[in-house]
Image (tube, rainbow, N blue to C red):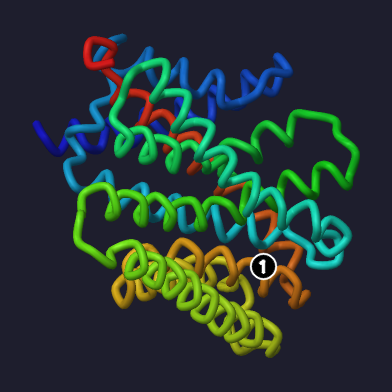
């Protein structure tokens, strides 16, 4: 019975995710709005058809897989030449903008909800992340100037791994009280960023170089080869230094996307469709796990 629940939950989440985004496309609505509505409606507080808890620890594996592909696809679509035109604004958004968001959100919940400073700072670090899972569907349905769209795409992709590592840093700081912990965690933060950048740069260059060699990867196997390699890079980096894989796959996507491989167009189309499928499933599963009585 448990196996039936697991298989049915994944099947319904995939189908509902595609349906929600299709309806949103027809109605000219942001896809995320209907994804959240469908997820809550199918979850425990709705029809009860989707049971994320039946996946157990497998839910984390699904989330990891989806995030790796989504971030790689986000990096794949970032053109360095376009980002360089927005370099100063982009740098401010992912540094100064992130700090202002963290501080502002922490101060708001501290004053309005009377949370402790440790919880307030942790909340602030979590809302720093916009992420391609939210930004990309919104930008897809909005008509914006190309330079503004490039800036928001770049911020959405780059802030995701930085924000995730920042949240780990803040969490470790809030649960520890040893002297010198701030300096230690700051070094750990820098080390995770550096390792993620290094692994992503090397991994992306190797993958791009392999795809550039004609017939090295059999025709028709390029997409599945890249899919397997991305997840291996994500998990491999994470095994060496926790939470570094998220940055590694993002950087790898940027490197591969700017190497202009012979299969570039097919690769982008495949990743676009796969990302739509995974984003839908991810939001359905996460929204279905929401319980209003626990809020």
Depth check: 117 or 188 in front? 117
Would you say 33 lies left or right of 243 here?
Answer: right
Would you say 230 lies left or right of 135 here?
Answer: left
Residue 89 location in percent, x, y?
79, 52
Q: Determine the image quadrant of residue 42.
A: top left
The residue shown at (59%, 79%) is 201
The residue shown at (17%, 42%) is 56
Residue matched to label 1 = 254
Residue 34 location in percent, x, y?
54, 18
Q: Residue furthest left?
A: 1
Q: Looking at the image, how many numbered discs can be counted on the residues?
A: 1
Mark 1 burial class by Cα count in 10 Å: few <14, some 14-19, many 20+? many
Compared with 250, 39 (above or below) is: above
Depth check: 285 or 221 in front? 285
Camera sees residue 276: no
Residue 16 location in percent, x, y?
45, 25
Q: Determine the image quadrant of residue 141.
A: top right
Would you say 62 lies left or right of 203 here?
Answer: left
Residue 274 location in percent, x, y?
55, 49
Q: Determine the image quadrant of residue 223.
A: bottom right
Compared with 195, 157 (above or below) is: above
If the image is split into quadrants, where does the N terminus sit? Answer: top left
The residue shown at (33%, 35%) is 117
The residue shown at (41%, 28%) is 284
Would you say 159 lies left or right of 257 here?
Answer: left
If the image is split into quadrants, where does the C terminus sit? Answer: top left
Compared with 228, 122 (above or below) is: above
Camera sees residue 142: yes
Q: Secondary structure at mark 1?
A: helix
């Amino acid at each position: 019975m448990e196996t039936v629940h697991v298989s049915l939950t994944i099947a319904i989440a995939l189908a509902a995710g595609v349906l929600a985004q299709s309806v949103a496309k027809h109605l000219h609505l942001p896809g995320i709005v209907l994804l959240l509505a469908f997820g809550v409606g199918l979850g425990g507080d709705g029809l009860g058809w989707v049971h994320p808890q039946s996946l157990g620890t497998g839910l984390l594996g699904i989330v990891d897989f989806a995030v790796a592909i989504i971030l790689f696809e986000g990096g794949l679509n970032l053109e360095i030449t376009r980002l360089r035109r927005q370099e100063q604004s982009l740098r401010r958004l992912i540094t100064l903008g992130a700090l202002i968001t963290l501080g502002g959100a922490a101060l708001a919940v501290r004053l309005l909800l009377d949370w402790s400073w440790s919880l307030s700072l942790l909340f602030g670090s979590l809302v720093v992340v916009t992420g391609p899972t939210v930004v990309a569907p919104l930008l897809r349905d909005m008509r914006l100037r190309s330079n503004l769209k490039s800036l928001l795409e770049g911020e959405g992709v780059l802030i995701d791994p930085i924000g995730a590592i920042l949240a780990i840093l803040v969490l470790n700081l809030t649960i520890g009280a040893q002297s010198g912990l701030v300096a230690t965690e700051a070094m750990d933060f820098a080390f995770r960023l550096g390792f993620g950048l290094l692994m992503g740069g090397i991994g992306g260059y190797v993958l791009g170089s392999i795809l550039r060699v004609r017939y090295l990867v059999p025709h028709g196997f390029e997409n599945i080869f890249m899919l397997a390699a991305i997840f291996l890079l994500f998990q491999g980096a994470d095994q060496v230094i926790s939470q570094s894989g998220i940055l590694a796959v993002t950087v790898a996507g940027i490197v591969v996307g700017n190497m202009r491989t012979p299969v570039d167009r097919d690769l982008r189309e495949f990743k676009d469709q796969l990302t739509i499928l995974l984003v839908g499933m991810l939001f359905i599963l996460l929204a279905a796990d929401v319980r209003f009585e626990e809020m």
